[in-house]
Amino acid sequence: MRVSSLKSVADLQADGLVAPDAALDKVAEKYVIGITPAVLELIDRGDPDDPIARQFVPTADELNTTPDERADPIGDLAHSPVDGIVHRYPDRVLLKAVHVCPVYCRFCFRREMVGPQGLGTLSAPALDAAIDYIDNHREIWEVILTGGDPLVLSPRRLRDLMERLAGIEHVKVVRFHTRVPVVEPERINEAMVAALTASGKTTYLAVHANHPRELTDAAKAGFDLMLAGGIALISQSVLLKGVNDDVETLAALMRGFVENRIRPYYLHHPDLAPGTGHFRVGIEEGQRLVQALRGRISGLCQPVYVLDIPGGYGKADIGAASITGADGCFTVRDWQGGEHKYPPT
Ligand SMILES: *Cc1c(COP(=O)(O)O)cnc(C)c1O
Ligand code: SF4
């Protein structure tokens, strides 16, 4: 296996993943490139529509932007009281210590903030201020580490951060959102698991994966280590055109999570990030897909289909609104589309 990541158009060309194309140089000027050895292994070079390549190999489509798209599609900046903290809901905050990722997903909702030209890594004083903010807000029950990808930090730095959270009594839960277990599984070792749990708080980790082929044996070894270390695993996926926008793929992905003791959590409707129109699926199509999942796979395998409302208004569950009506006359829709009356009490 290759030992280093692909980080430029020249690297991609040398590897035969793209042909020379001036448009790609333009894409690379705007959005950083990153493909790890583990992802490279997963790419099926015989398939021009490979769902893994589609997520990571840049295309000229990224130069097409629409008026609805925005640099901060979910409104993080509107709710950031200090650098590195997003406090949108009373009981939980995002803590973004790094804006670096092991890979750079072409559909990323924070693509204008991540990478070397992005918001960078919090300085030591800024991190101190972020921890103080959490300490001073007693309503914060949960700290969610995201980024970028928090697991690019070394176990030593993560442990240090977790030990600081350990001292904050009102924080009961620490949650990580990460793509590392899938795209750089070799980082998940005993030292990493010990660091992730060093706060002594209840620890959850959301694994970001979008296609069942991403759940490799190497990824599974990491899931097992984390589960054995007492970390609860949940999933996070983005609904993406040409990657997972069909019932078979979504069903296999959700079953794959459950088989690995990862409880499906969110299926995100793709955000309005610049140059990502070629990944977007219509809302009605998304609702049709999640409704079809309901009958097809176990209740354990059902994700919540969510939209992050532009402007910083938070997430909304947009799964097929299956009950409608009011005042004594409700109609409930079943997974095959059949409609049934239901009384109010
Ligand atoms: C998504 C998000 C959260 C976490 O929301 P949950 O519904 O608890 O998973 C928290 N804060 C912000 C700002 C978010 O965008
Ligand atoms: S890992 Fe997450 S934050 Fe990083 S590029 Fe992919 S979607 Fe964006």
Image (spheres, rainbow, N blue to C red):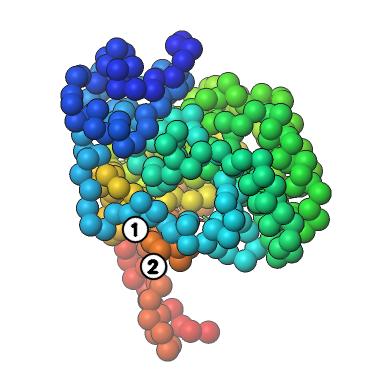
**Would you say residue 95 is visible in this rendering?**
yes
On the rendered structure, is 224 left or right of 313? right
**Would you say residue 318 is visible in this rendering?**
no
User: Residue drawn 30% across and 47% down?
Assistant: 274
The residue closer to the viewer here, 146 or 295, is: 146
Residue 329 in picture, x, y percent from top left:
39, 85
Q: Describe the element under mark 2 as helix, strand or loop.
A: loop
- The residue singled out by tag 1 in the image is 287
Asked if marks 2 and 1 touch (Cβ < 8 Å), the reply is: yes
Quarter assignment of residue 285: bottom left
On the rendered structure, is 83 left or right of 141? left
The residue closer to the viewer here, 7 or 171, is: 7
User: Residue drawn 29% across and 45% down?
Assistant: 276
The residue closer to the viewer here, 59 or 221, is: 59
The residue closer to the viewer here, 319 or 197, is: 197
Q: How crowded is mark 2: few (under 14 residues within 10 Å), some or many (20 or more)?
A: few
Whole-Å distance between the Cαs marked 2 and 1?
A: 8 Å
On residue 321, the disc is: 2
Q: Residue furthest bottom?
A: 327
Residue 153 in picture, x, y percent from top left:
61, 31
